[in-house]
Amino acid sequence: MTDPIREDDPYANKLRLDKNVSIVYPKFKILDKTDEIIKFELYEANIALANALRRIMISEVPTMAIELVDIRENTTPIHDEFLAHRLGLIPIKTPNINYF
């Protein structure tokens, strides 16, 4: 196999790996797949890659949440702002997510 790093690259020596080091690539195993859900196993991957995939998947899912809260009377020991924040964390499922 040829070395993918060009010889005229000034950073080539810094990028070149030790020939005794083997690279382990992450692997996926798809367990179940439907139109809306996919279940898979990720193995031989480091935690940073798994966390990056998790964050990307969460950010790509369309969601709705409560944005404005008007609390008229709060008789609980919890502050109004904290209640409003907690209500905003509740995910709301709707089939019309693209219309909002």
Image (cartoon, grey):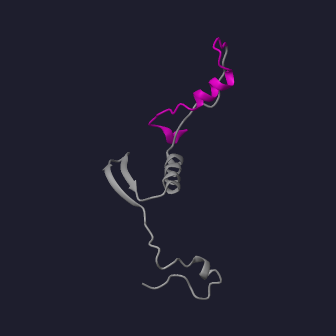
Residue 43 x %, y %: 39, 56
Q: Residue furthest left?
A: 32
Q: Which quarter of the picture shows residue 23?
A: bottom left
Count the marks: how many? 0
On screen, residue 80 above or below 9 = above
Q: Quadrant of the C terminus?
A: top right
Q: Residue at x 63, y 29 (%)?
A: 85
On screen, residue 92 above or below 11 = above
Asked if residue 10 lies left or right of residue 95, the reply is right
Residue 48 x %, y %: 53, 55
On screen, residue 73 above or below 44 = above
* In front of the other: 61 or 53: 53
Q: Quadrant of the N terminus?
A: bottom left
Residue 58 x %, y %: 51, 46
Residues shaded magenta: 73-100
Q: Residue furthest front?
A: 20
* In front of the other: 56 or 69: 56
Q: Which quarter of the picture shows residue 16?
A: bottom right
Q: Residue at x 66, y 14 (%)?
A: 74
Asked if residue 15 lies left or right of residue 2, the reply is right
Residue 2 x %, y %: 45, 85
Queried whether the magenta region covers residue 79, the answer comes back as yes
Asked if residue 77 lies left or right of residue 42, the reply is right
Queried whether the magenta region covers residue 47, the answer comes back as no
